[in-house]
Amino acid sequence: DAGVIQSPRHEVTEMGQEVTLRCKPISGHNSLFWYRQTMMRGLELLIYFNNNVPIDDSGMPEDRFSAKMPNASFSTLKIQPSEPRDSAVYFCASSPEINTEAFFGQGTRLTVV
Amino acid sequence: GENVEQHPSTLSVQEGDSAVIKCTYSDSASNYFPWYKQELGKRPQLIIDIRSNVGEKKDQRIAVTLNKTAKHFSLHITETQPEDSAVYFCAASIPGYALNFGKGTSLLVTP
């Protein structure tokens, strides 16, 4: 298995634009997580899914952020409209079951100018 | 939700010395405690984990200890090497919930 695959690896966009981050979890994993990493706040949990169903989105900063998991092999995190303070590295991770090892993708480095 | 505190935020040791990183958690229902290593520009990767039914676990030069009563757990790295230099994250999770991470410890091992 190639592991968790995220795209794009880097994204530079202008303030106000829509940004869509993509994630393909490891096949057979039932849980998927979106984390945001910044120097100030470390690794923050944004939202997670179990069997494609969102379980907890309390970490999503505000209504500008949304996430979907239409099937077991694909998830998106969308920011609309984007703001400079959204600049961070966004990681997707998956695990066989909740409460077990999370395998991280390589991350998407987002810069909003 | 679960709150994980991690100390120190930075740690510098000489090659061959030991390094200890400590974490505390807030929810006594937490039962899974992994440690991740993140090298510069890379993804976090699991190095060792422990469940609440075990007090200590060791894997070569790294070990983790858990004190459920005090709600704290620690990572111990012995005989440190320059390639151990990285950011280390502790995490905790409650059954049925996602991992909550500490803020990380930047470890520098100097030759």
Image: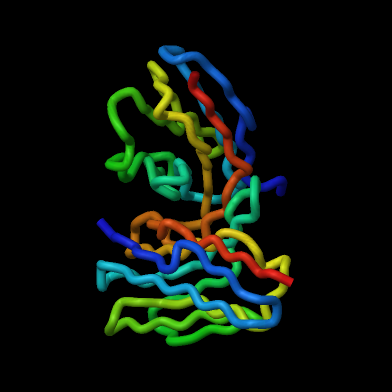
Q: Tell me if residue A3 comes above or below residue B50 in the rendering.
A: above
The x and y percentages for residue A37 are 47, 44
In the displayed structure, A45 sits above or below B93; it is above
Snapshot quadrant of residue B23: bottom left
Q: Identify the residue at image location x=43%, y=74%.
A: B22
Q: Between residue A66 and residue B5, name the one nearer to us.
A: B5
* Residue A32, percent from left and from top: 47, 45
Above or below residue B101? Residue B69 is below
Rendered location of residue A1, percent (x, y): 71, 49
Count of labels shown?
Answer: 0
Please indicate, yes or no, whether residue A111 appears anywhere in the rendered image: yes
> Residue at 26% across / 67% down in the picture?
B26
Residue B48 appears in which quarter of the rendering? Answer: bottom right
- Determine the residue positioned at 29% across, 60% down: B2
For this view, does A1 lie left or right of residue B99?
right
- Colour mode of the rendering: rainbow
Q: At 35% from the left edge and 64% from the top edge, which residue is drawn?
A: B5
Observer able to see residue B59: no
Answer with left or right where residue B27 lies relative to residue A95. left
